[in-house]
Each structure stands twice: as structure tokens, then as C-alpha cells.
Image: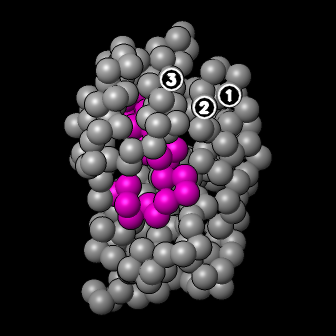
Amino acid sequence: MTGPQNVGPEEVGPEEVGPEIGAVAGTDGRPRCPWAGSAPDYRDYHDDEWGVPVHGARALFERLSLEAFQSGLSWLTILRKREAFRRAFAGFHPATVAAFTDDDVARLLADAAIVRHRAKIEATVHNARAVTALGEDLDALLWSYAPDPAGRPAPRTAADVPARTPESEAMARMLRRRGFTFVGPVTCHALMQATGMVDDHLVGCFRRGGE
């Protein structure tokens, strides 16, 4: 992920870590990726979700949508609003969101509990329609871009973690051809990291390798 530059220490997330930092031991003695120790929300997300394989069209559509909403913002903002996003977007069921009307967009723009960004809201509705028009399983389609783990060097510091890869670039091109928006290669790589398509936990992190 790529994050903003003007964030405070309490908002340092996976997109905002100093480049030469390796795994850091937390107060519980467990070594983690350095971004995980900056806020309890990040620690829980790191320990329980980030890099854990995610399957199913609804779950993957939710992650893709939230990664798009994160663009230009701290991931902490999205984490803290995630339940509100789920309520606002009907649990991110693609068929339901695809049926949203202009009245729904207006409702979302008035909802202070989420990120009220018209282009991102409209992109989420648009992408739900793209999911329903795919004619194939979103899960299988996205996971077909997961690289062979044996061909990826294990990152030792934040500097070793790429913001984009050939696989995320290929995924972004495919999604754009299928009519998706707000799906650049950086967003796609963030999706791949978050959903376990790649393992970007640092060497030494207790979650490396799905431990």
C-alpha cells in the first residue's frame, strides 16, 4: 500500500514504515512487522487477518473495495470504519451493491461513519456491477494471479517489501479490461498482501509463513 506522508506515529501502518526496519518485538515479546506495534487496531489486524488467505466473492469484493477507499488515507482510518462500511454497503454482497441507485449514493454521501468520497463510492457500486457481469468466479480469477511462493524472496526489512509487482500489474490490467475502476497495481498488491495471495510478513515476524 502507499500511504500519506503527513500522519502521526499512532497512524503508522503497513504503508508507512521506515525502509530499514525489520521485525520488532512487541510488549508481549512476539516479534512482528514494525507497523503492527503502533496501534492496537494494527496489532490485531496484523496478528489475525493480514496475510491470512481469504476466499469467496463477497469477502474479496469487500477487501478490494476497502483497499480502494484507503487510497490517499491511513489504513487505520479504514479499519476503524470497517463495520460502518459493511452496514452502509449491505455486507458487500456484490449483487446487492450492484443494484444501488442514485438515492443510495446520496445516502452514502450523507453517512459520516464512512469515507464520504463520491468517486470511491461510485466506483464501489460500479465494481459490484463488474463482479456480477464477470461470468466467472471472482475468487478463482483473483487467486490465479497469486505467485509461486518459492519464487519470492522473503523480505527482511520494510525496504524489501514491494509496493507493486508484475503479478499485481497483471491483475490490475485484467480488472480494468473487465470494467473495474480504482484498481491500480499498488491497490492490487495491497489486496494480494491482505488476502494471503502473497506473504509479505518480514523474516522474524511470528506470522511469517502463516505461523
Q: Which residue is mark 2?
A: 181
Label 2 crowd (10 A; few <14 / some 14-19 / many >=20): some
Q: Which residue is mark 1?
A: 176
Q: Is residue 205 visible?
A: no
Above or below residue 98? Residue 157 is below
Give how far across and how far down residue 136 sits, in percent.
Answer: 53, 14
Q: Residue at x 67, y 59 (%)?
A: 163
Give the Cα distance between marks 3 and 1.
Answer: 12 Å
Q: Quadrant of residue 111?
A: top left
Q: Quadrant of the N terminus?
A: bottom right
| Marks 2 and 3, the one that precedes in the sequence | 3
Contact, CB < 8 Å: mark 1 with mark 2? yes
Amino acid on which disc 1 is placed: Arg
Q: Which residue is mark 3?
A: 126
Q: Residue at x 55, y 57 (%)?
A: 72
Q: Quadrant of the C terminus?
A: bottom left
Amino acid on which disc 2 is placed: Thr
Amino acid on which disc 3 is placed: His
Find the magenta span and give its range.
55-79
